[in-house]
Image (cartoon, rainbow, N blue to C red):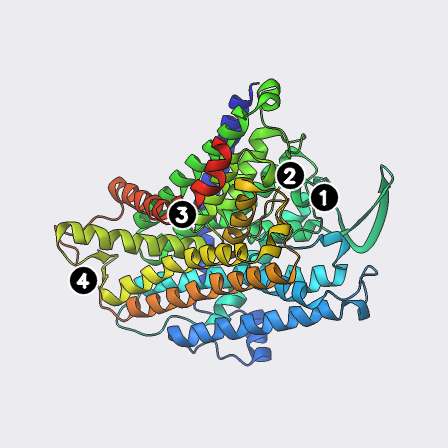
Amino acid sequence: MSPTAAGVLLVAAMIAALALSFKPLGDYMYRVVTREEHRKVERGIYRVIGVRPGTEQHWAGYARSVLAFSAVSVLVLFLFQRVQGWLPLDNGFIGVEPALAWNTAVSFTTNTNWQAYSGESTMGILIQAAGLAVQNFVSAAVGIAVAVVLVRGFARKATDKLGNFWVDLTRIVLWILVPISFVAAIVLVAGGVVQNLTDFTTTADGQTITGGLVASQEAIKNLGTNGGGYYNANAAHPFENPTTWTNFLIIYLLLAIPFSLPRTFGRIVRDNRQGYAIVSVMGVIALVSTSLVITFETIGGGTVPQAIGAAMEGKEVRFGIADSGLFAAATTLTSTGSVNSFHDSFTSFGGGVLMLNMMLGEVAPGGVGAGLYGLLVLAVITVFIAGLMVGRTPEYLGKKIGAREIKLASLYFLVTPALLLIGVAASLAVPVNLDSMQDSGPHGLSELLYAFASASNNNGSAFGGFGANTPWFNTALGLCMLFGRFLPIILVLALAGSLAKQSPVPATAGTLPTHKPLFVGMVVGVTIILVALTFLPVLALGPLADGLH
């Protein structure tokens, strides 16, 4: 079978798998987040943490809860790493040095899971399981909770009540993330992924390899679109990803929840057509991106790639171009960061598409929750632009998009470009930072650009040649992860509060239909044009110049 045919069949199989789970998974999540009764285990948790589940919060209260929970998470995880050498199951490792501990604590709390270290040589089993893996669950749950609040803002009328953060967080972890991760971990173990609560070592090719709690971490890191891995080689390591079918399952786990959340959105706003429109936008962008990545890696560039029929440098030979390309596109279109090949070794144009995926705001389908609320913000901007074109007040789902709403949406869009571009410029202004780049010229700039795109958009993947474990980059990238996560969340919650206070206006003959192909095309166009106008100059200096060199 030709590489092209293999790629087409792989992508078609993934689309089929996602289509099969779209309705049942989306409906199940709808029931979880809208259920009125509180189950016994939930009530027990609420008593322990002192929460009154029947009390709903306005947007500012919800935001304070998100920020307080995340601040405590950063502090606890930071201290946990610092005292690692005094704890059991430390694998013989000492405490993590302060700058790296800060960077890692922020990374996992923000659902980025950027790792400026080798997992198997820095963190013991206790830190991996009780620290990092816990954040794999709760940071992903925060994203889903915020998305649900924005949807409630569209669905509710004349109220300032948007739900209870602690109730949403508890239900999402208990009834969505934990059960699916449990089943996925068992399937991965059956496929050969290591799962062991005690550390073990083995020797291969004269090297000592350490292993331990891998399968459960692999399941939740991908289900929650997190990127941290037990091994530095991540999903290219045979202990984490031993076969082509486990590779397929891992990619599916990256995409399943983000692609199903639009169904949940449609159910909550009581118009399933709106959910189909949003998932169509996600699907169009994802399909184009995946096709471009696989094509660029298949045609390659240079004498060797053309001689062997593809650019195989940095690819896992067990998987080949199609599996590597689909994985790379999926991991950068979501906020995952998990990799089964080395993105630094992709062709210049292929790597450029991966950067563009993150710069789009990771909305196709994006991280769990984050992709949905990001795309809904872009939908708000789209209807505003459409309203300007026809000279009428824009409306979306019966809610008017006025000055306050469009200001919040615009600020949301400006956060990550500002962090990315300022971070790159500031880093280049410090000469010693150039030593972190493996290459000079356009590819060196691409390494730096990719790092800040990954951090600012809470992705977590990296160009492997970039040396990020320095005081400057641990601090700067940590700040980008922190602000890139929570500034947009605050703006989204404020937007939800503004929308919920409105009473819906009836649709008229002049109302833009937001469930038809025209609107889908408009949202895709606005998404791509906004990104192109913002990032084209720096992309021209990086991957485009590298590819044309």
Report the residue marked by disc 1.
193
- Spatial CA distance of label 4 from label 3 is 37 Å
Q: Determine the CA span between mark 2 and mark 3.
A: 35 Å
The one of 463 and 471 positioned closer to us in this rendering? 471
Between 96 and 171, the one nearer to me in the picture? 96
Q: Which residue is mark 3?
A: 535
Separation (CA) of disc 2 from disc 1: 9 Å
Of the two numbered discs 4 and 3 on the same chain, state the one appearing first in sequence.
Answer: 4
* Residue type pointed to by label 2: Thr
Residue at x 47%, y 54% (from the top left corner)? 28
* Mark 3 crowdedness (10 Å alpha carbons): few <14, some 14-19, many ≥20: some
Evaluate if marks 2 and 1 touch, with contact meaning CB atoms under 8 Å apart: yes
Q: Could you tell me residue 82's position as x and y percent?
A: 72, 69
Residue kind at label 4, given as amino acid type: Val
**Which residue in the protein does label 2 denote?**
246
Cα distance between the residues tagged 3 and 1: 39 Å
SS label for mark 4: loop
Q: Secondary structure at mark 2?
A: helix
Instruction: Say if mark 2 contacts mark 3, CB within 8 Å.
Output: no
Q: Position of residue 319 (x, y in %)?
A: 63, 31
Q: Check contact, mark 2 vs mark 4: CB within 8 A.
A: no
Q: How far apart are labels 1 and 4 at the CA level?
A: 53 Å
Q: Amino acid at mark 3?
A: Phe
